[in-house]
Image (cartoon, rainbow, N blue to C red):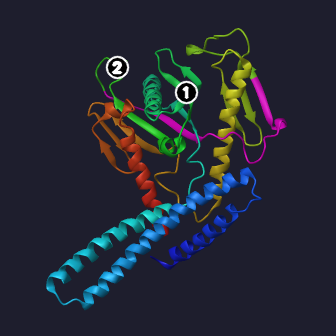
Amino acid sequence: MNKNLQIKLSKISDTFDEVQKQLSSPELTNEDRVSLSKKFSSLEQIITKKNEVKKIEDSITDTEELLNEEEDDELVELAKEDIENLKKNLEIENNNLKKLLIPKDKDDERNAIVEIRAGTGGDEAALFSMVLLRMYQKYGEIKKWKYEVLSFQETNIGGCKEAILSFSGKNVFSSLKYESGVHRVQRVPQTETQGRIHTSASTVAVLPMVEELETEIDQKDLRIDTFRSQGAGGQHVNTTDSAVRITHIPTNTVASCQDEKSQHKNKAKAMKILISRIYEKQKKEKEEALANKRKSLVGSGDRSEKIRSYNYPQGRITDHRINLTLYKLEDVISGNALNEIIEPLKEADIEEKLKDLA
């Protein structure tokens, strides 16, 4: 273990002892006790793993001493075998310890807003956006998450021009954040009469859902416009101005909603989307301000990056960030096998972050 890691672990041990003392204080408020208990639980995992590593290191030292003193050939071989196994185990547990030391993304436990937009490819892109929409809905059901359609714009042929959904449940953002980017599809469109393969794309953006910002939004900074809801083809579907568009003037961030008949409900949904968009923009600005921060290829969340291709003729799906190819396209777009892409992405993200701790 390198010196920097040892120093870091020493500081964590001191913090753990201090938190333990604070928790025994009878003067703690319930709010402080909940906060400290959460911190204690997180630190305890690291301390437990650190002790496990120390125990293996001590076993290696003891066995090596025994090896130096032992003269029986058979026992020497057994000792060598034990040392080899202990060293393998030490490498695994050291790696597990490092994973616990990776700074937690505070957004990982949040719920998420998923925005899907048809990109290049016209009607075919909109039809593929509908495929992605259903894939995420099904994946959410498998994960036992709750989802709500915040906004949905359908095309004349049953495609999805734009959809915005919220997902609520356990560690939603930590899984869905890897879906941000450009999803490219190669297939013969339903509208193609000569059987030619077309390429089109849809863009997915995943935002952590936040209830409120660190800096409260001043109502004077909001411009709220109302208009009549429009359906597929642009025709008005409502005789009242129930649709709402909210603009946050300082950041030029816009969110709109027209799905509900009630202007009040549309405003509430649009506000939920707006707050998450402002939060994401502020988060990106903070990350870019850290000049020495190494950008993660896997978890960057860059919505302009081409992340995945769906090749229908070959039944193949490829994630370009980790060069992962699966020949189970139908299983993935049904939501059943999406985890077989998300989990390797999580692992790749962890591996990248472990390099910073090496």
Q: Position of residue 1 (x, y in %)?
A: 44, 76
- What residue would you read off at disc 2? 192
Q: Which mark is residue 162?
A: 1
Residue 191 on the magenta segment: no
In front: 202, or 57?
57
Q: How busy is the neighbourhood of tag 1: few (under 14 within 10 Å), some, or many (20 plus)?
A: many
Which of the 4 quarters of the picture holds residue 56? Answer: bottom left
Magenta-colored span: 197-225
Residue at the image position 47 percent from the left and 17 percent from the top: 158
Residue at the image position 32 percent from the left and 25 percent from the top: 188
Residue 198 on the magenta segment: yes
Q: How busy is the neighbourhood of tag 2: few (under 14 within 10 Å), some, or many (20 plus)?
A: few
The quadrant the C terminus occupies is bottom left
Q: Position of residue 166 (x, y in %)?
A: 58, 32
Q: Position of residue 172 (x, y in %)?
A: 52, 41
In front: 226, or 189?
226
Which of the 4 quarters of the picture holds residue 32? Answer: bottom right
Tag 2: residue type? Glu
Q: Is residue 135 something that shows in the picture?
A: yes
Tag 1: residue type? Glu
Q: Nearer the viewer, mark 2 or mark 1?
A: 1
* 64 to the left or right of 12: left
